[in-house]
Amino acid sequence: MAPAPGSARIRTRSRESSEAPGERLYKLAQNRQEVLAAKRQQAEEERLRLEMDQATFRPSINSSQKACSGVARNRPEAVCEQYASKSARLRQLNQQRTDEELQECTFKPSIDQRSDQLIADRLSRLKITGSVHDHLYADACRWQLRREELGRCLPDDVTFRPDIGWEQYRPSNDDSREGFIDRLSQPRERKEAQAQSFQFRPATGRGPQNRRNRNNMPIGEFLYEQAKDLRAMQESSREAAWAAQTGSTAPNPGSQRILKESRWRAFQELFEELGPVDGAL
């Protein structure tokens, strides 16, 4: 007798219902991940194959290079060995260069026994132990410190101590002594900054308010005529001041004519005596 059409499906569902909840979904997700991983691997292999198909360069390697053993550069031991050999080579080259330079130094001073004895006595007197070069370096450092101290000290004859009165108790304008010293050491910059802040800048570009050269004369002639008028005004003012001071009036025209003629005769005589016959000096 044949089973009913839906009996097999019912039995399958009964078996699946006997599994743990979520077991079927987990298996489906795992199978899907395996399929996706296989597809990604296949796509990567296809991409590499296409790249290798485009790489048509084939380098030519000689037989001597084929027999040469390679060195793994990423190994730390190989890197250390390469660095050590390079350093040894550099030291050797530096030593050779030093030896070549010293070959030209042919001077060899001869120190007699007396000099050796003087140096030995000095070392024993100063109780110098160790290298002489270190002692000389330490001695030079001590002298440098001594010179700096002497440079900061004032001479003995500098005894002036000014008394500024009650101003010495006035509060300082600076926050600390370092600020006071910095302000005194930079007076020029401070004065320049103050000068720039209070610098007077007059307004320029304004022309004369009154027209002076009304006749449009050349500038040279205009300045010359202006100077003549100024001199005439100064002469008249001096004469007026002299007349007011002496109480005398100005000379009359006859006196002026006589004075002018006497001057003319004096100049005429001087000209005739100094000049040649043709009348030119």
Image (cartoon, rainbow, N blue to C red):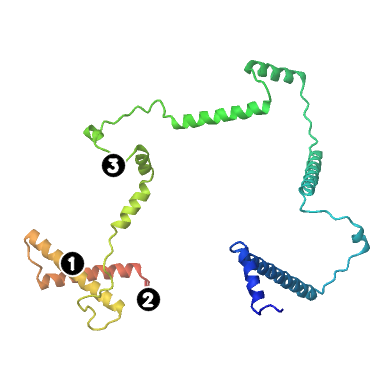
Q: Is residue 61 left or right of residue 258?
A: right
Q: Does residue 27 sit above or below 215 in this rendering? A: above
**Furthest residue to the front?**
1
Disc assigned to residue 83? none
Q: Is residue 19 left or right of residue 57?
A: left
Residue of label 2 = 278
Q: How many marks?
A: 3
Q: Is residue 24 left or right of residue 155?
A: right
Question: Which sits earlier in the primary sequence, circle 3 or circle 1?
Answer: 3
In the rendered structure, which amino acid carries the disc numbered 3? Asn
Mark 1 or mark 2, whichever is nearer to me:
1
Residue of label 3 = 173
In space, the residues marked 1 and 2 are separated at their CA atoms by 39 Å
x, y percent for residue 229:
20, 73
Mark 3 or mark 2, whichever is nearer to me:
3
x, y percent for residue 133:
67, 28
Question: Which sits earlier in the primary sequence, circle 1 or circle 2?
Answer: 1
Q: Is residue 75 left or right of residue 243?
A: right
In the rendered structure, which amino acid carries the disc numbered 1? Gln
Q: Does residue 185 sit above or below 118 in this rendering? A: below
